[in-house]
Image (spheres, rainbow, N blue to C red):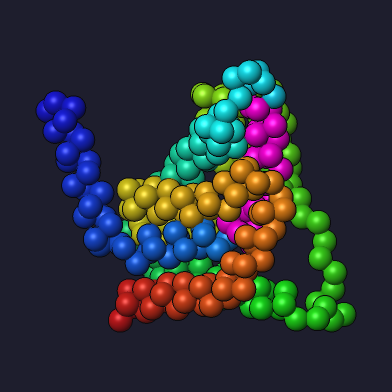
Amino acid sequence: MDALSLLDAGLNQCAVVIDRDGGLLLALLTAGLVGGTTHCAGMCGPFVLAQVSARLERVPLSAMSEFRRLTGAAVLPYHAGRATSYALIGALSASVAGHVGALPGLRWLSVALLALAALFFLGYAARSLTSWLPKLPVFGRDRPRSAGWWGERVSRLARPLFGNPTGWRGYGLGMALGFIPCGMLYGAVAVAAASGSALTGALGMAAFALGTVPSLLAVGLAGHVAGRTWRTTVARAAPAVMLVNAGVLGWMAWKLVA
């Protein structure tokens, strides 16, 4: 079979997955869009700004143009690398869940994962709503979060790539930082794993990564000021979107039981 035939077969298989699991893919895309503005822009924004500064500093003033500024601020290799890591995580988690779920007595695994993800998005919606209310003592103060030992280790290994984050180095940086854990990523992985299909898991996490790109592009192009403005606007719709996502995932879990 030649390369074109393999490509055609792969595209056809992707089309089948999109048609079959469109609801799951859409849920992950919208989760990325909302999570990207309310969470990822704050957590990953410094990584993006550091790359933008490093890339533009290496461009001579005489060669600087609007196109160079835009491409330098977009850091597309970084986003491609991050999407690759997410897709690998999605494929692996879905493959493991699919094999485990096929074992006798464990067929409820997909239902449990979908229900868990639905509860996660429901909790995220509730948290987004409380962020617009006056702070009460019962909620306590927001504490800075750490990615933990694993996140610090990944950041340390990726640090040398920040020196010249272009081309394959930018792609490698995105792949490395794509493995830094965060709560939003956990919820997305649970949804992808529930599919039990490596291809669906990979496409789902790629859709999630795609959803996070607009907010990070805004940060890269115009800095944290524009990022905060964009986040404030989208954050108002976040509870409704996450409630819809939770409802869709809950309905999918119910369909597996019925």
Q: Looking at this view, is 230 or 116 the one in front?
A: 230
Q: Position of residue 183 (x, y in %)?
A: 63, 58
Q: Looking at this view, is 29 or 201 the one in front?
A: 29
Q: Position of residue 68 (x, y in %)?
A: 56, 29
Which picture quadrant has residue 66? Answer: top right
Q: On screen, 53 above or below 218?
A: above
Q: Position of residue 62 (x, y in %)?
A: 63, 18
Residue visible at 21% across and 55% down in the picture: 16
Most frequent secondary structure within the magenta stretch = helix
Residue 215 highlighted magenta (yes or no): no
Q: How many marks?
A: 0
Residue visible at 58% across and 71% down in the picture: 238
Image quadrant containing the N terminus: top left
Region rendered in magenta: 36-56
Q: On screen, 169 above or below 206?
A: above
Q: On screen, 177 above or below 169?
A: below
**Residue 162 appears anywhere in the view:** no
Residue visible at 35% across and 67% down in the picture: 23
Residue visible at 25% across and 49% down in the picture: 14
Q: Looking at this view, is 200 or 241 the one in front?
A: 241
Which picture quadrant has residue 160? Answer: top right
Q: Position of residue 200 (x, y in %)?
A: 34, 53
